[in-house]
Image (cartoon, rainbow, N blue to C red):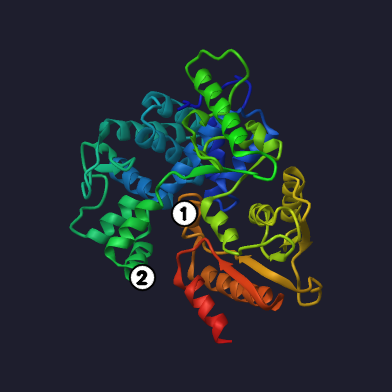
Amino acid sequence: MATGEHSDPGGLDGREAAYQAVLAVLRGRGFASEVIRTLRTKQSLTARDAGFALDVALGAIRHIFTLDHVLAAVAHVDKRRTRPELRAILYTAAYQVIWMDRVPVFAAVDEAVKQAHRHVGGRGPGVTNAVLRNLTRCLASRQVEWERLNPAHIRTDWRQATAFTRPVLPAPADLEIHLAAATGERPARYAALRKCFGAEAAEAIAWAAQAVPVTVVQRNRLRISADDFQKRMRALATSAASEESGTHAGAQAPSGLQQMELTPDAAFLPASAHLSEIPLFAEGLALVQDPTAHSAALLVEAWPTERVLDLCAAPGGKSAVLAIEMENRGEVVACDSSPERLELVAENRSRLGLTCITPRPAPTRKRDDLGEFDAALVDVPCSNTGVVARRPEARLGLTSEKLASLIKTQRELIETAARHVRPGGRLVYSTCSIEPAENQQVVAWFLAR
């Protein structure tokens, strides 16, 4: 794993990019991955530093409530009285110390103090140094076997933990409070999971939300054979492994590719791998598609020559899966309410050579001329509680008011999709949520009408 030093002394480094991404999330101004993608495009952030930044930023956000407990335990940090800039610095540094055992502790601490000089000033650098020195003094080991319910253990992998010399989590005497802190959930959210799914399933769901997801590169089977796909991806992995060991003299290979797992139709990469460095993606021979989103599109069972509606299409991954299943015949009408996001659908269509996709603005009450379809997919906006590992920002923003607003939108969208499906046609409703109110209850409401 990279350590986040500057690849270019005059450029932006991984730690600074991670700080900016976490700060944007704390201020409610975007998603960490989008911030880093923008920095990668507009500033001199290398692929390797961008990968490091993504690891740190998403990790810090994923574990933000656990970090609050740890920092309070070792240094009495009260997040309510701490400026967002300082919180972002402490979160990213503490995440490196606790979860990234290949990053030297001194590097994480020293760079955090420098960031405090740049972004906080005043007492900020001294506070940063004191908090992180307290944290490191309390470390017993960064690699021990994880013990469930040990308040001095922070789980860092399925079987591994960072151990402290003192408890940093609430005592397990109050099991629900302890598990909420350990898994990085708010107590009220953990209680809701337990009420809905039961104690055993709630704990499993909460731990799963801490897992580091993979990036899945799917083969565009209309443009490249399984053999050629595997050969080219293996060549990239070999190049990356050679560069990692220092024996590769050519151009920098994509970070993380040496950890690839490969099947005839897909390559599974670390989340930090950068698609811009994968030639197959740029050439339209592959697309990025999470397996769960991929399966939602497959449930439509689209056939060549059919007319299929993808009502919430952007950025276009599911429309692409539908078009590939249809052998680029018939028509996939890909709608979205955002003109900017609809441009992403058009870009994917062009890159992948899927001419049967027709991007269209989403229908409205005043303008609805889409016509009739054999099938429709409506993958609605939702709370994202089923994909917290991939979108950890979902931990921070869900309120009862927001959930109610989402459900209203979901009902409107399923009704809109149904209006356009011919008699005897097919309608697939999907979410990225595990909330019954967004899933079974929306479907029950629709069927009862």
Residue that extends furthest to the left in the rendered view of this protein? 173
Q: Is residue 271 above or below residue 335?
A: above
**Residue 394 location, x and y as percent?**
50, 56
- Can residue 420 be seen here? The reply is yes
2 and 1 marks in contact (CB < 8 Å): no
Residue that extends furthest to the bottom in the rendered view of this protein? 449
Q: Which residue is mark 2?
A: 196
Q: Is residue 270 above or below residue 177?
A: above
- Side of 50 relative to 333 (left or right): left
- Can residue 87 be seen here? The reply is no
- Side of 261 relative to 362 (left or right): left
How far, Cα to Cα, is label 2 from label 1?
A: 17 Å
Sequence-first tag of 2 and 1: 2
**Residue 64 location, x and y as percent?**
41, 48
Element assignment for label 1: loop
Looking at the rendered image, the quarter that the N terminus falls into is top left
Q: Which residue is mark 1?
A: 388
Dot 1 amino acid type: Val
Element assignment for label 2: helix
- Count neighbours of disc 2 (C-alpha within 10 A) and say few if under 14, some if 14 to 19, many if 20 or more: few
**Residue 343 location, x and y as percent?**
76, 52
**Residue 103 location, x and y as percent?**
40, 27
What's the residue at 52%, 51% (across, down)?
A: 291
